[in-house]
Image: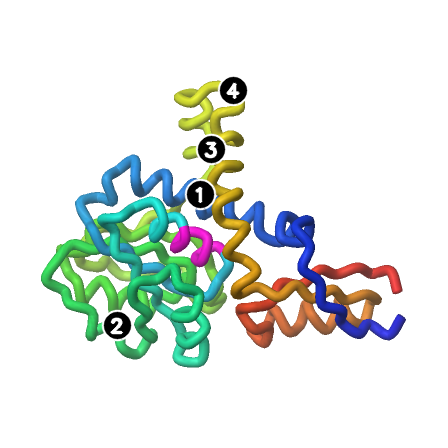
């Protein structure tokens, strides 16, 4: 069928594309809130144009009135990130030293860029109260890294938070709260997300390679089928 994309916007597509990612956003938000944001009132999200970061920014912006959400992104994506409306401030990677370092901050690192993380830790020093490693959108990060000032970077492990909350909230508690948060997030998707449907092996290969090499615009979500 040629593999030409068709644009759709069905709720089922949003569910398939983003609900699993939004669950991670929900769990990180819950973890930070449970720990009172480690004393910080500014939360920086790297790879701010990623779907998981957007979900987390939405939760922080809409539910935490005393938290300032700072999106860290590339210059090419800065306009898009600012247009979403869930970041109080958008800062490009080459300008992170412009963020005032005179107060506590928390970092949720979706990018996994070791150079960026080191620059942020050295800029904020002991004001870096939490440094959570969530993703690896930058695949060239080294396995071993030097000691950095401030909070030690630690991996966030979602299953641990799920198990903890399942014990505390009881049967169905996690799903009920996640569903409520998702219901508030879904109406925002039409403002910034375009669902692109493509069919056929050639189309699947093309989108896969474009994703691998960072050529997919952040405002797109792709639904793919090998069937022609």
Residue 34 vs 14, above or below: the answer is above
Proximity of marks 3 and 4: CB atoms separated by less than 8 Å: no
Magenta segment includes 227: no
User: Any mark on residue 177, and which?
Assistant: 3
Magenta stretch contains residue 56:
yes
Q: Mark 1 points at which residue?
A: 26
Say which quarter of the image contains residue 28: top left
Which image quadrant for residue 195?
Answer: bottom right
User: Which of the 4 image quadrants contains residue 69?
Assistant: bottom left
Mark 4, other Cα within 10 Å: few <14 / some 14–19 / many ≥20: few
Q: Is mark 3 on a helix, strand or loop?
A: helix
Q: Earlier in the sequence, mark 1 or mark 3?
A: 1
State how far apart marks 4 and 1 are (Cα): 18 Å
Could you tell whether 10 is left or right of 189 in the image? right
Q: Residues within 10 Å of mark 2 (few under 14, many from 20)?
A: some
Q: Where is residue 59 in the image (x, y as percent from the top left)?
A: 39, 48
Which residue has dot 2 on it?
Answer: 96
Left or right? Give the position of 87 relative to 39: right
Q: Which of marks 1 and 3 is in front?
A: 3
Of discs 2 and 1, which sits in the foreground? 1
Residue contact at pointers 1 and 3, CB within 8 angstroms: yes
Q: Tell me whether circle 3 and circle 2 mark residues in contact (CB < 8 Å).
A: no
Q: Give the range drawn in magenta.
A: 52-58
Q: Tell me the element at label 1.
A: helix
Label of residue 171 in the image:
4
């Amino acid at each position: 069928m040629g593999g030409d994309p068709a644009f759709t916007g069905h709720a089922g597509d949003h569910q398939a594309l983003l609900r699993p990612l939004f669950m991670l956003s929900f769990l990180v938000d819950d973890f930070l809130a449970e720990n009172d944001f480690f004393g910080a009132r500014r939360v920086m999200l790297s790879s701010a144009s990623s779907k998981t970061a957007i979900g987390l920014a939405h939760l922080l912006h809409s539910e935490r009135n005393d938290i300032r959400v700072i999106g860290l992104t590339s210059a090419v994506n800065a306009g898009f990130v600012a247009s979403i409306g869930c970041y109080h401030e958008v800062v490009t990677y080459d300008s992170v030293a412009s963020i005032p370092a005179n107060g506590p901050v928390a970092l949720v690192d979706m990018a996994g860029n070791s150079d960026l993380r080191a620059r942020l830790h050295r800029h904020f020093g002991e004001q870096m109260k939490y440094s959570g490693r969530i993703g690896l959108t930058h695949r060239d990060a080294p396995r071993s890294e030097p000691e950095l000032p401030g909070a030690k970077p630690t991996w966030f492990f979602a299953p641990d938070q799920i198990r903890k909350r399942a014990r505390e909230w009881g049967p169905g508690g996690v799903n009920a709260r996640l569903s409520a948060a998702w219901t508030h997030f879904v109406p925002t998707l039409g403002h910034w997300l375009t669902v692109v449907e493509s069919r056929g092996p050639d189309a699947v290969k093309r989108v896969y390679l474009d994703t691998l090499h960072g050529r997919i615009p952040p405002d797109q979500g792709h639904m793919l089928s090998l069937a022609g």
